Image: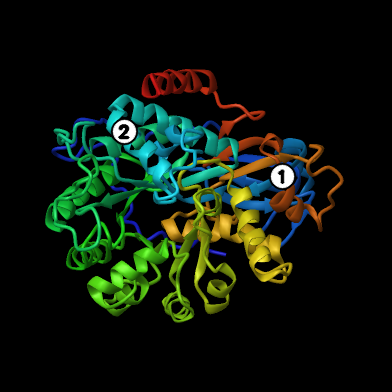
């Protein structure tokens, strides 16, 4: 099977820097990968339909899978991964890396007359007002390293911190986005930087009322900055390692006329378009009051929903809107851990899948970074609501794992998501003798991984045939945690 196109132009010159973006220099793209061909032989390999024993797989010098083999000579040549099973790397379709600084800081109950999210929003405001440029880099590295520890090899970073803590513009409007990419490259994770537009504070609010650190100005300025970022990233990073999409934060934050202009730009460059929609019932009511339609219906009416569109959250959507998303073959990114933590709920995934829409998964606010837990919580939430089992499909484990891999890759325009010839060798291994999954056979292993795996069972992570995690530890493990601890101490001093 050929890999799905990621709709991004190939890199033709990876060393030239784009004018006006010299503030964050990118590393050279030339990398020594050692042998011409690298191979692995775990006890089992997940090939998309089942776990297969006695099967080696190989990658070329560019980190792409070239072949699978059972030939004795190939089995002898491959690196033996005894007691381990290999699975395609997970794809995290929605992340706010700087939210990692919030963990455990907003688990308080506000006054009875306050909004249910008041304590969380208060903590978010504090973080946004205090994080330095260095803190943003260190926090992103921490979040991305945790993702590797959870078997995630690719992340869609919904990036909306654009200015200095006091709201003053950076000399380069893309500086902090490039710092987040630099953090991802330091860790070794693939990244789709989804550059966020934010114009106003809420529905019917004046343009320019957005929070100062997040404000991007009108659509024409945003598009100009986005194109400069897209050009710089394309010229300075391997195309599969880092690329750009665009993300109007929501219809509350970006008026429809400006969102349409951003959507036109995304379409012209074949970029992914991600938007928060219908997270809460109040959002739908406010959108209908301003535009006469709820968010999904409005975006569909204006031609903004297609196969490159991802609706983030989509919790409060109607059956008719489910059909609209399905007919367009759009994707919904569900973030169950965050949704449950904030008391918001989660998307009607079973209806979306039945209608033909894709369902991907995201770790969102990083209350916990465990995409497999997001997968199981998505199903468990549906079971509780419907009071039945196996709601999302007859083969629940396969459907959920597909959401955490293949559909996430499609949402981001990534080339990974499956172990297939032509795709990158992005995979993680699990210890078959870990107590959480010990005793599983080939037929039950995927269900064990999806419903029972603990993060400690993840042994190694390989991205583009390069080992990024060995025996559950990153090479920069200590320094990354040390820097993050120092950042947290400064951020929360006196709280």
Name the residue: 53% across, 73% down: 352
- Local crowd size for mark 2, using a 10 Å CA cut-off: few (<14), some (14–19), many (≥20): many
Q: Earlier in the sequence, mark 2 or mark 1?
A: 2
Which disc number belongs to residue 47? Answer: none
Q: Quadrant of the C terminus?
A: top left
Name the residue: 29% across, 49% down: 195
Question: As drawn, which residue projects farthest toward the right?
Answer: 439
Give percent across and percent down for residue 296.
Answer: 36, 72
Q: Secondary structure at mark 2?
A: helix
Residue that badge 1 annotates = 453
Q: Place residue 368 in its image quadrant.
A: top right
Q: Quadrant of the N terminus?
A: bottom right
Q: Secondary structure at mark 1?
A: loop
Give percent across and percent down for residue 102.
Answer: 44, 35
- Pick the residue in front: 232 or 39: 232
Q: Note whether residue 36 is visible.
A: no
Name the residue: 56% across, 72% down: 353
Give percent across and percent down for residue 71.
Answer: 76, 49
Q: Place residue 119 in its image quadrant.
A: top left
In the displayed structure image, the side of residue 120 where residue 213 appears, left or right: left
Residue that badge 2 annotates = 179
Q: CA distance from mark 2 to mark 1?
A: 33 Å
Question: As drawn, which residue projects farthest toward the front?
Answer: 112
Q: How many marks?
A: 2
Examine the rendered structure and indicate whether residue 153 appears above or below residue 129.
Answer: below
Name the residue: 64% across, 35% down: 460
Examine the rendered structure and indicate whether residue 296 appears above or below residue 467.
Answer: below
Which circle, 2 or 1, is nearer the viewer? 1
- Local crowd size for mark 1, using a 10 Å CA cut-off: few (<14), some (14–19), many (≥20): many
- Pick the residue in front: 444 or 364: 364
Give percent across and percent down for residue 315.
Answer: 47, 64
In the displayed structure image, the side of residue 256 where residue 474 appears, left or right: right
């Amino acid at each position: 099977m050929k890999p799905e196109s990621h709709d991004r132009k190939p890199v033709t010159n990876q060393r030239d820097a784009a004018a006006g973006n010299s503030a964050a220099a990118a590393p050279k793209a030339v990398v020594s990968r050692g042998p011409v061909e690298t191979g692995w032989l775990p006890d089992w390999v997940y090939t998309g339909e089942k776990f297969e024993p006695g099967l080696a797989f190989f990658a070329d010098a560019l980190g792409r899978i070239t072949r699978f083999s059972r030939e004795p000579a190939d089995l002898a040549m491959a690196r033996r991964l005894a007691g381990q099973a290999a699975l395609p790397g997970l794809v995290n379709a929605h992340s706010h890396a700087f939210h990692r600084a919030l963990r455990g800081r907003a688990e308080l109950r506000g006054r009875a007359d306050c909004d249910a999210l008041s304590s969380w929003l208060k903590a978010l405001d504090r973080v946004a007002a205090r994080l330095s440029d260095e803190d943003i880099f260190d926090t992103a590295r921490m979040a991305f390293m945790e993702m590797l520890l959870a078997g995630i090899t690719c992340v869609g970073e919904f990036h909306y911190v654009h200015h200095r803590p006091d709201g003053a513009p950076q000399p380069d409007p893309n500086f902090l986005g490039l710092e987040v990419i630099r953090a991802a490259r330091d860790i070794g994770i693939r990244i789709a930087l989804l550059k966020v537009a934010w114009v106003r504070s809420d529905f019917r609010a004046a343009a320019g009322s957005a929070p100062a650190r997040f404000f991007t100005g009108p659509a024409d300025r945003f598009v100009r900055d986005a194109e400069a970022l897209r050009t710089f990233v394309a010229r300075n990073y391997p195309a599969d390692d880092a690329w750009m999409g665009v993300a109007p934060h929501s219809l509350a934050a970006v008026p429809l006329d400006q969102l349409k202009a951003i959507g036109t730009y995304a379409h012209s460059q074949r970029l992914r378009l991600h938007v928060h929609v219908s997270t809460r019932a109040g959002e739908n009511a406010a959108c209908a009051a301003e535009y006469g339609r709820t968010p999904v219906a409005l975006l569909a009416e204006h031609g903004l929903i297609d196969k490159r569109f991802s609706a983030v959250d989509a919790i409060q959507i109607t059956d008719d809107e489910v059909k609209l998303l399905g007919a367009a073959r759009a994707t919904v990114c569900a973030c169950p851990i965050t949704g449950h933590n904030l008391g918001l709920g989660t998307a009607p995934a079973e209806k979306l899948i039945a209608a033909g829409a894709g369902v991907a998964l995201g770790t969102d606010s990083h209350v916990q970074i465990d995409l497999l837990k997001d997968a199981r919580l998505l199903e468990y939430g549906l079971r509780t609501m419907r009071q039945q089992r196996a709601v999302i499909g007859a083969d629940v484990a396969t459907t959920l794992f597909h959401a955490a891999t293949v559909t996430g890759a499609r949402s981001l325009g990534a080339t990974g998501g499956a172990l297939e010839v032509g795709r990158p060798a992005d995979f993680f291994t699990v210890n078959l003798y870990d107590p959480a999954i010990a005793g599983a056979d080939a037929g039950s292993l995927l269900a064990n991984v999806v419903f029972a795996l603990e993060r400690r069972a993840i042994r190694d992570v390989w991205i583009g045939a390069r080992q990024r995690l060995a025996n559950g530890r990153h090479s920069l493990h200590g320094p990354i945690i040390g820097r993050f601890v120092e950042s947290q101490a400064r951020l929360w001093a006196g709280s």
